[in-house]
Amino acid sequence: MNGATPRRADAVTRLEAAYGGPSQSGFGSAVFRQVLKDGDDLTQAALSTYRTFVGQRWQRYGEAAWMGPWRAVYAREPSARPDIDTELRGIADPDARQSVPMILDNIEGAEAGRAALSAVFDDPTVTELRVFNLGDGAAMSGLLVAGRCGDSGETTYLVFLMD
């Protein structure tokens, strides 16, 4: 994690403890991180992370199935007060809204999970945050939260996909 402060590294470790580390299972939740360069597009990086998480299922079910539900459902305004819990609960998209309680409330250790989400995505160094709707176009649905720190380029993704 190039450029990560010890406090931020600890916060990401706690997020991984709550939601799981990097995975290609295509089911459940996982946390990924990478360092983006100044010119890298957060949406494209999030899409790449989504493909990694889905793994071999991406080819099995076909790109059209996975990309059908893919869309940005929230982008934090630069002047907004960071509050990932409120931001997720305020998502208006009806498909994406269904996944919000699964991430915030219906996990083991929900309070610790919400605290970890806040520590990572409400960090003042996060300069760009987006939330995407995902799924397979049938039974599976979920969200991807992507937060990028401006100075370091450190980017954290939380991917959640369930049926």
Image (cartoon, helix red, strand yellow):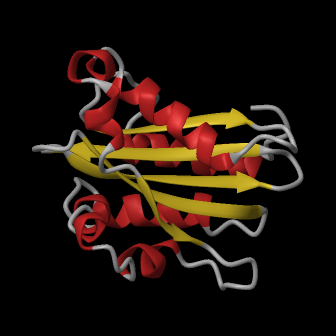
Q: How many marks?
A: 0
Image side of residue 35 versus residue 67, left or right: right
Which one is in front, 63 or 105? Answer: 63
Taking the spot 22% from the left edge, 39% from the top edge, the residue there is: 136
Taking the spot 35% from the left edge, 80% from the top edge, the residue there is: 92
Residue farthest along the front direction in this orientation: 64
Whether 52 is drawn above or below 79: the answer is above
Taking the spot 83% from the left edge, 56% from the top edge, the residue there is: 150
In the picture, the quarter occupied by the N terminus is top right
Quadrant for residue 130, please give it. bottom right
- Percent across and percent down for residue 141 are 22, 49
- Percent across and percent down for residue 78 are 75, 77
In the picture, the quarter occupied by the C terminus is top left
Whether 98 is drawn above or below 58: the answer is below
Taking the spot 89% from the left edge, 53% from the top edge, the residue there is: 151
- Percent across and percent down for residue 89 are 36, 78
Whether 133 is drawn above or below 85: the answer is above
Which one is in front, 24 or 61? Answer: 61
